[in-house]
Amino acid sequence: MLKNAPKFYELAKRIVEITEDAIIVAHNAEFDYRILKTEFKRLGFDFKRKTLCTVELSQQLMPDMESYSLGKLTRALGIPVSDRHRANGDALATVKLFKMLLNKDSDKKIIKQAIKIEKKSKLAPNLKDIIEELPSDIGVYYIHDANGNIIYIGKSNNIRKRITQHFTNKNSKSKKIQVHVAAVTYEKTGSELVALLKESEEIKTNKPILNRALKRNQFSQGLYSFIDDNGYINLRISQLKKDEKPITTFTNRKSGISFMNKMVETYQLCNKLCGLQKSESSCFNYGIEDCNGACINEEAPEIYNKRAIAVIEKNTYDNKNMLLIDRGRDIDEKSVIFIEDGIFRGIGFFDLNYQINNREILESLITPMQNNRDTQHIIQSYMRRNKRLKIVNLGN
């Protein structure tokens, strides 16, 4: 869609002209305004305009709405929308919504009060200096107090942006960081997976005062399997069990069910045998010929179970020897996560010209790390989300 569209710098002058002495009206105006500010900053231009947010106006003038997303709001108000989620369609919908809000606010007091004028940054000079020294790269960052103690550890795909948020947000954690921060150090990782694993281990090791107790409640659901009386493998998403090891884990039930639905579609599994549908007879998918009839013993267990086992094999690294190869810290480097006999051993970095299939060479590259339920969840979740992650099976 954007292949033949003009570049921002080609439109910048016109945007300045049409917005001069005007108020920018948008649904979630803070987001759109921030994007404009960022693009103009790249061109060396300080773009400042007044803004008006139709989300905030709607909340004030129509406080009883179920949702304030543009789509649901326009549907509830009977505003016709064409070309939804396209710039033109959403802009026209916002115009119609804004006109309705103008009519509701008969004396225009609320709308006048809602106009926002960008204020000058109140960021303290020392915080500005810290931000200037930080990279816009993936990695783990450490926030130190005046005594050098680590008070907070985090991970980000853009360290500078994340620290800026800490220094400007108004929540209690950010305010404490702003009061106590004296320095920020960091370690670039190149890979989000490496950053997640390092963050988890560093928090456990250092126990910074401003980090919440890591992350016992980070994942609550697991994928389990059992064989029913008819010999079919059943799969279930359920609350984690102390005495059973899950095939893989999920942050919440919603993400687990979403995963299970994908597996049913991809591997032609039965909704009923995957716990997605309760039925005394066949599942719904059997009626539309998307299920081969395992739910009513029509498909042989040994045939159905091959597909169920494929799901289990795909989503566990139990007893496997494998390498996960991901991005490195620069263009000539890759990161590697080493799993041996189903146990996470550690992480390392290697040059692209380096052969790492040799166990001795591999072990010399790896920095050992703790294997626990958190690392298992982080690795499995990342493998599910990142289809381009290179996996090298080392065999036994």
Image (tube, rainbow, N blue to C red):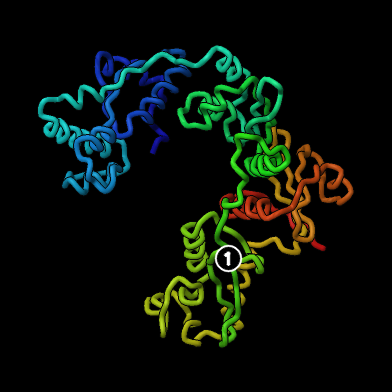
Q: Return the x and y of residue 159 as percentages of the image width and height.
A: 59, 29
Residue 139 visible at all: no
Quarter-wise, where is residue 330 in the image? Answer: top right
Horizontal relation, residue 27 to residue 78: left or right: right
Q: Residues within 10 Å of mark 1 (few under 14, many from 20)?
A: many
From the viewer's side, name the closer residue of 77 and 56: 56
Count of numbered badges drawn on the protein: 1
- Residue type at the position of mark 1: Leu
Q: Which residue is mark 1?
A: 223
**Residue 43 higher or lower than 164, as above or below:** above
Task: Identify which residue is drawn at 60% across, 67% down.
Answer: 311
**Residue 63 higher or lower than 98, as above or below:** below
**Residue 336 higher or lower than 109, as above or below:** below
Horizontal relation, residue 51 to residue 119: left or right: left
**Secondary structure found at label 1:** strand
Q: Return the x and y of residue 128 as percentages of the image width and height.
A: 55, 16
Horizontal relation, residue 306 to residue 292: left or right: right
Residue 353 visible at all: yes
Q: Return the x and y of residue 217 as percentages of the image width and height.
A: 57, 52
Quarter-wise, where is residue 234 in the image? Answer: bottom right
Task: Identify which residue is drawn at 42% across, 13% down.
Answer: 45
Task: Identify which residue is drawn at 27% across, 14% down.
Answer: 20
Task: Identify which residue is drawn at 28% across, 33% down.
Answer: 56
Horizontal relation, residue 23 to residue 242: left or right: left
Q: Return the x and y of residue 36 as percentages of the image width and height.
A: 39, 24
From the viewer's side, name the closer residue of 98 and 61: 61
